[in-house]
Image (cartoon, helix red, strand yellow):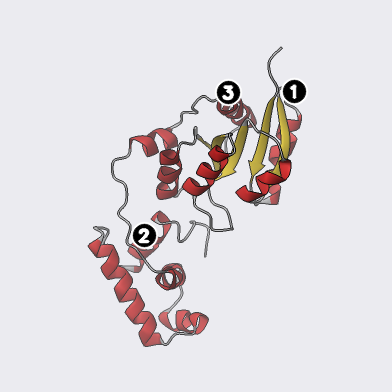
Amino acid sequence: MSTRRTIALVEDHALIAIGFRDLLAGADDLELIGMVESVPELDEFGRDLDLVVLDLRLSDGSKPEENVDAIHARGSHVLIYTGAEDRRLIQSAARSGALGLIRKSVAPAVLLDAIRTAADGREVFGTDWAAAIDADDVLQDAKLSAREQEVLSLYASGETAVSVAQRTGLSRETVADYVSRIRRKYAEAGRPAHSRIDLYKRALEDGILDGHET
């Protein structure tokens, strides 16, 4: 008789979590211990877990590599579960020692197979994961400040300088200065951003925008 693997899900989207729960309910060899919205909440379970299925991008602002490290410290394997296209975040997760990545769009049977594989401590290979592991073009950090990231997130997603100023409490001239500074920092990092579209791409790459914002 095969060992029943213990699983937990870290996911802050309720509908995704419900679907995950229902899927595992039909798998006799997998036991879903619980679902939480952040990694620290895993402590609530008070027991060892074979595998933690981890959403790549959580609303608490935590970084993938920090989350993976924290889960490894608890003695569990990690499988990344995501709908995001952010190459930088995927590379970060790959470098952190997670066993693989599975898309939220995959068929239920594919997800179950990936969970079983990772719960056994084996790598889950896919095109996204292979590209992240093999990538030698790790993006140079532009080292934007928190305020610069805030301005970029608004401006790159379509806000005018005037509306950014109103939302941040800055003057229009200060916003323009921030945008110029942001462009300069990206240029110095070898990632030029001459246009607003370029800024949008840089924001996606750095996880400042997630590709679903309007």
Q: Earlier in the sequence, mark 3 or mark 1?
A: 1
Q: Give percent across and percent down for residue 103.
A: 54, 39
| Mark 1 vs mark 2, CA separation in Å | 44 Å
Residue 95, quarter of picture: top left
For the residue pair 201 and 80, the one nearer the viewer reads as: 80
Which residue is identified by label 3?
Answer: 120
Q: Give percent across and percent down for residue 154.
A: 46, 71
Which residue is identified by label 1?
Answer: 28
Which residue is identified by label 2?
Answer: 202
Secondary structure at numbered mark 3:
loop
Q: Amino acid at mark 1?
A: Asp
Secondary structure at numbered mark 2:
helix
| Mark 3 vs mark 1, CA separation in Å | 15 Å
| Dot in front, 3 or 2 | 3
Residue 53 visible (yes or no): yes
Q: Earlier in the sequence, mark 3 or mark 2?
A: 3
